[in-house]
Amino acid sequence: MPELPEVETARSLIADEALHRRIVDVDDSDTFVCRPHFPGELQDALTGRTLTAARRRGKALWCETSEGGPDLGIHLGMGGRIVVTTGDGRAAEGGGPRRSDAQPRRAEWDRFTLKFADGGSLVLFDKRRLGRVRLNPRTDALGPDAAEVTPAEFRDLITRGSVAVKARLLDQSRIAGVGNLLADEILWQARVSPAARTGSLGRADADRLYRALGAALDSAIAKGGVHTGDVIEARHPGGICPRCGAEMRHGTVGGRSTWWCSREQVAQG
Ligand SMILES: [Zn+2]
């Protein structure tokens, strides 16, 4: 599942490589990926326009279009990637991590394509077909973006109520962009138990979590995804905390598979 860093690499790729190029054709024939739009609907709405800006809030990604056109929303699904090709055929990719066992690109896994007047293209490449393309996606139910939330906003959202802190981090209506791996990384970096109740966290805990959030996001964006986090490789039976050497524990917190250090992430009370 892409989290904020993967979506950000796709957004910055589009911003760097795909803006202000005239769209001359659109392949929106995949009725599953493009639902609820009919074949041709995206083509009619986008042909002749350019993408003018690439925006992101949490895991939501969308492009603004010229001449007052609709926003083009692109959801990467579980492992989708954006591939932008120049007029002379040079391709650049962004989005979900390219796995070491990745198979070469196949045309049938191109789920949605914008063709540009210069001969290049923007493609949603998604082998698993869980991505989604739609016009004017709604983003108003999302909380502040995890990369832009202020310390005061974060302190407020992470210390109110009485839910497991991990569940709060995953609640996209409170803070947008943190998924399962990133939540485990942030909690481990801050030495906070995933099961700690939000109401039990003090200012020092909140500020430590805030710093861990910023550091984890910066690192994951720089290294290409949340799978590069320091504790991610220890998320398996027999895993050892890479900081203190204690055994990693496993359980379900906030409805998700969760790993934490048995020594450093102990719930208070
Ligand atoms: Zn530890």
Image: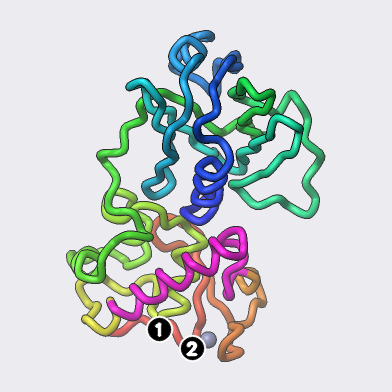
Three-letter code, disc 2? Arg
Q: Check contact, mark 2 vs mark 1: CB within 8 A.
A: yes
Q: Of 170 and 247, which appears nearest the observer?
A: 170
Which corner quadrant holds the C terminus? Answer: bottom left
Circle 1: element type: loop
Three-letter code, disc 1? Val
Name which residue lies at 45% across and 14% down.
37
Per the rendering, the mark at residue 263 is 2
Compared with 172, 117 (above or below) is above
Quarter-wise, where is residue 25 in the image?
top right
Name which residue lies at 18% across and 67% down.
156
Per the rendering, the mark at residue 266 is 1
Name which residue lies at 70% across and 30% down.
87
Q: Is mark 2 within 8 Å of ligand 1?
A: yes
Q: Magenta segment: does it hold 109?
A: no
* Residue stretch rendered in magenta on the structure: 207-232
Instruction: Report the residue that reaches farthest toward the bottom.
Output: 244
Q: Main secondary structure of the magenta part?
A: helix
Residue 69, given in percent of the width and then of the height, sits at 37, 21
Quarter-wise, where is residue 120 in the image?
top right
Q: Is residue 202 left or right of residue 219?
A: left
Per the rendering, the mark at residue 68 is none
**Residue 1 seen in the current view:** no
Q: Is residue 125 left or right of residue 4?
A: right
**Label 2, residues with CA under 10 Å away: few <14, some 14-19, many ≥20:** some
State how far apart marks 2 and 1 are (Cα). 6 Å
**Residue 165 seen in the current view:** yes
Q: Of 223 and 209, which appears nearest the observer?
A: 223
Compared with 44, 224 (above or below) is below
